[in-house]
Image (spheres, grey):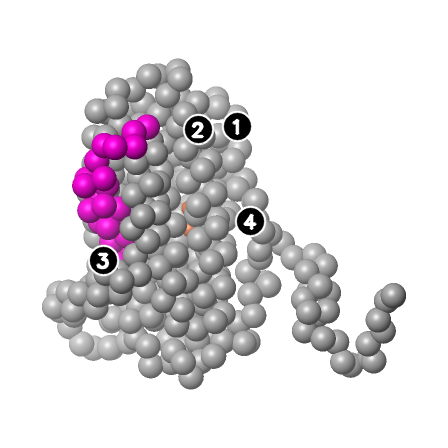
Amino acid sequence: MMMTLPSGHISSSAKDIVMAGEDFHRPGEASWSVDEIRYHEIERDRIKEDTQLLYLLTSASFIEITSDLYTRNLVEFFGEDRETVQWLGECWEPEELQHGAALKRYVQAAWPDFDWDGAYQSFFSEYARTCSMEALEPKRALELAARCVVETGTSSFYTMLAEIDREPVLTQLAARIRADEVRHYKHFYRYFLKYCERERPSRIAVLKTLLKRAAEVQSEDALIAFKHVHLMRNPGAAFQRSDYDSYRDSVRQIAKYHFPKEMAVKMMLKPLGVGAMAGRIAVPMAMSLCSLFLG
Ligand SMILES: [Fe+2]
Ligand SMILES: [Fe+2]
């Protein structure tokens, strides 16, 4: 029997159903849209003094929202491979951009006094100058292994962000982004297997690529992002490297307890196609990946 609710008294689950029926724009294969996030329900009192979180989220938003800078040469690299190129352009890039947009809106809603646009502008002018396009691997299979490394890093980061559970709207958002990142990993891994059949890279070549990419991830990106958030928050003050170092140490403390080691190790080992090998190698690799955002 259908239950009729008096008008003006829609239960929250009924409201969810009504909301779910709305025609939100969900990019690519994402199961969510930035417009569905309930930014107005953010419990600001819980996080308004949480500077560490402001830095973490703003840095992540800067890097995600700039994804289009490095999508183009990847698309070129896969040239005539329509399946991969189509997925990169129609799913991967718009989903990464949505991650950036969703985090940006969160930062703006949670810390309205922080000038995100101003900080991003100065971040971008330095980042675009110093950002040498990622050197692609000599073979497609190896480049795809490297992409698996990057997606392992982002999947782990958002898992950790959901796990620390600082604020409910953020926890939900982090879980949604995490699901996208894990799916990205699965796509790249599937394409990796396809190219392994054709190119037959040696296991050593794959291992070298994974290690190299993990090391590269410890780049200047996080430092540049931190610097521009810091300068925006402290106008006129000179930026000290020690500010960044103490922030990084504080984030490492969280990672010690909340970084999803087991998941990261599993994802990292998969392209090597071995179970027993390199658990010892993979853990520090995976930890260093996380530093893309953690610094
Ligand atoms: Fe992302
Ligand atoms: Fe991703």
Q: Label 1's element?
A: helix
Q: Residue at x 23, y 60 (%)?
A: 256
Question: Disc 3 to disc 4, how far (Cα)?
Answer: 28 Å
Q: Position of residue 76 (x, y in %)?
A: 41, 29
Does residue 54 appear left or right of residue 132 in this picture? Answer: right
- The residues colored magenta run 273-295
Type of the residue with mark 4: Ala
Type of the residue with mark 2: Tyr
Q: Which residue is mark 2?
A: 191
Q: Which residue is mark 4?
A: 30
Type of the residue with mark 1: Glu
Q: Is there a contact, CB below 8 Å, between mark 2 and mark 1?
A: yes
Question: Disc 3 to disc 1, how far (Cα)?
Answer: 34 Å
The answer to which of 99 and 185 lies nearer the viewer is 185
Does residue 275 appear left or right of residue 75 in this picture? Answer: left
Q: N-terminal of the two: label 3 or label 2?
A: 2
- State whether residue 249 is above or below residue 288: below
Q: Which residue is mark 3?
A: 295
Q: Is there a contact, CB below 8 Å, between mark 4 and mark 2?
A: no
Q: Position of residue 180 (x, y in %)?
A: 48, 48
Type of the residue with mark 3: Gly
Question: Disc 3 to disc 2, how far (Cα)?
Answer: 30 Å
